[in-house]
Amino acid sequence: MGGTAGGTTERFGALLRMMRERAGMTQEELADRAGLTPYAISALERGTRKRPYPNTVRSIADALDASADERLVLIASIPARGDRRTDATESTARSQTAPGMAVARARLLIPPTRLYGREADVAAVAEVVRSGAARLVSLTGPGGVGKTRLAAAVSDELSPEYPDGVVQVALAAVVDATDVFATVGRALGLVGSDGPDAFDVIADHLQDLRLLLVLDNFEHLLSAAAQVGRLIALRPRVTVLVSSRSPLRVRGEREYAVDPLVLPSLDVTSADALAASPAGALVLDRARAVAPRLATGASEIRALGELCHRLAGLPLAIELAGAHLRLLSPQSLLERLDDVTSTSGARDLPERQRTMRATLDWSFGLLTPQQQTLFRLLGIFRAGASLEAIESVADRSGALPAREVLDLLVQLVEQSLVVVRVGVDGQHRYDFLEPVAQYARSLLVAEEATRASLAHAQVYLALAERAAVGYENADQVDWLARTEADEANLLVAVDRSLDVGDGATAGRITWAMWLYWWLRGQVTVGRRYAELCLAADLPRAVRSRVLLTAATMSYAAGDAAPSAEHWASAFQLGQEDSDPEVGTKGRAGTGLAALTDGDLGLATQCFREALTLGHQAGDAGIWMRSLVHVWLGTLLLLQSDPTGAVLEIKRGLELARGRGDRLSTYVALYNLSQAAIAVGDYMRAREHLEEGIELSGQTQDRANLAYFLETLAAVEAADGEARRVAGLLGAATSLREKVGADVYAYYLPDESLRTAAEDGARRALGDDAYDEAMQAGRALELPDTVDFALNGDVGFNA
């Protein structure tokens, strides 16, 4: 193959077609591999697409697996700037309408690295333009998300459709909005466009041109937005593509939000799995570029995946951090990430993008003083917050009046500094991407940070205590979701309160969260926080309740000795302080400890005393009384009195249903199912189990659900449903593994029934089919597990 610089466009097209056909590819196949569109490949081969960008040629050469010599020949065949034959052809249309005024094709400096994960974005933006839906399209997003790169890729895609060219104007260095159109005039190569009439000169020049104008980094020049809107109104053949951290907010604008790159799974362990996501592919590319011999074992790949998450999928942040893999292992890079993102990156980046800190300084500097105050204040939250919480913290801390928060928050969202998402509770939450959150926290210091921290703790203490009441009533599912959405804020409030010696606040939040931790199977977390609080200086009423939390978490984790000790200590404090709520819970806990030890006499005595104290506690004792009645029924079952057990359990069930309390209801239903099985009434046992499974799914109580599934497997075994038995036991095993503890240690099922069900199903199916069905059950997520248990199907039935 041969070719010379300055060869004709047809020569480039002919070479491209020859190389593609020799590789045995269609235009569609080459486009797919190169990350382009079939239209772009066709335009290049036909010669209607003039000078392709260098990164486009590199992508094509990579897709063709071209040799070094072939790459050089292909690049050399691109018409050089100033080639009279090509330039004359390109300027014919312009010279007919604007003699002597050629359009300069200014280009942005684009890093010579591959663009990952933007194919859908390029196609979507190009479609908006092609459809005529908008002639002003603004690419918006936070600093470092890749707006400039995307704008260049869209320009590359659309350039064949603009015979008068694509003009790209970099505005980051422009300080005054009145200079915007003077800068555009210089990019167009116009003489006399630096004066006050720059807009009119440009508008006259563009009168008959079909041109794509790209304005990059517009966010600090928004007072010039009205002139941009006026330009597209006056010149219907001109399209403007803007990159900005906030929209221009003019008529005719279509905003396109540029999201961070899609992230890999946090448990990724192979290079192929990492590269399957755009963020993972980018970090792997950077790693291989700077450290070709970098180890890529499971631990290194997992660290690279976590790196993507810590950097929130921001391409610039990944590029900057990835450069340090030349000297650091992925694991070490994670440990030093804050330092790394504050050090300089590639020299060819704009100054404002040499570090993530510089990028964020640029954004922060564009904010008004009030916006800056709210931005700093948002650094006190973790994993976002509701509008209500932000308003409360702003008001309590004295940072801003609550009434001003919403408008300022909207402005920060428009500046692409704050993102809006829907939490697990279905409510809107206002959050930062993680690098932005770290930056905001670095700005919140001294007295401002102290006031914000105290206000944050009080706001989340109030939330925790409202939720604790809700857990015991009909709206407990809503309160569980609300707590899950704000779990990170609640935990950091405990940590900060302990750090400043406010044990009372820390202990009250910990007590308020114990039932959430129980239902969610987070007993290790709950136990750790309870023990941290017990080491602090606590008021007596708070200490007694934290002792109850520590006891319950230890018991749920299967650690009987400390749980019994904590319950006894809590009961003693409750008696001394005449606190019947603490007394009833402490005495009931001692009864559970005795039940676990097999001391049925002591257990009965403690439960009866707990009932008396529960009545004395009034409304605060109803919840405990409903459970104590069920536990007394358990004792009667152990004493071979299923009839008496049912009567006692139903007393507890009645109290639970009266409050709409799902937890106490399904605890009662489980024990009723055991009583029904004891007398051979499998139909009634199934009814109790199915209702309990549905309620457990609503509260997402995995530990409880595991017990129900195992008992349902015993019922199914009686009906000869071998495949369902295997699936149910597999699902129960998986749930228990995820929780890491039995939690409901006071459930005392007949283990021989589970063993018999498993053995019978294995004999009926054979080992291979049994293991296959059990593995299928293990693979189910919680909603599918509930659906399978209640409705069958999910591929288990033959």
Image (tube, rainbow, N blue to C red):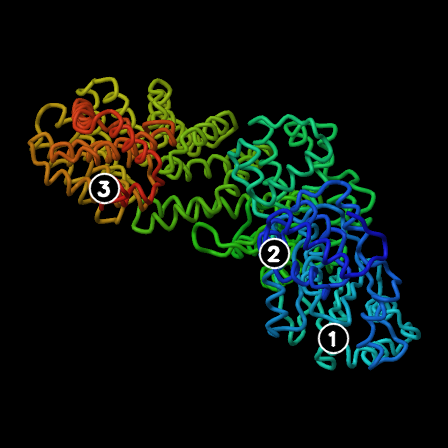
The secondary structure type at the circle numbered 3 is: helix
- Residue ID at (82%, 51%): 3
**Tally of numbered discs:** 3
Q: Earlier in the sequence, mark 1 or mark 2?
A: 2
Circle 1: residue type: Arg
User: Marks 1 and 2: which is nearer the front?
Assistant: 2
Q: Quadrant of residue 322?
A: top right
Q: Residues within 10 Å of mark 2 (few under 14, many from 20)?
A: some
Q: Position of residue 80 (x, y in %)?
A: 85, 58
Residue on which the image places disc 1: 210
Residue on which the image places disc 3: 692
Q: Earlier in the sequence, mark 3 or mark 2?
A: 2
Circle 3: residue type: Gly
415 relative to 192, above or below: above
Q: Residues within 10 Å of mark 1 (few under 14, many from 20)?
A: many
User: Marks 1 and 3: which is nearer the front?
Assistant: 1
Looking at the picture, tell me which residue is in the foreground, 484 or 6: 6
* The label number, if any, that marks residue 27 in the structure image: 2
The secondary structure type at the circle numbered 2 is: helix
The CA span between labels 1 and 3 is: 68 Å
Looking at the picture, tell me which residue is in the foreground, 767 or 539: 767
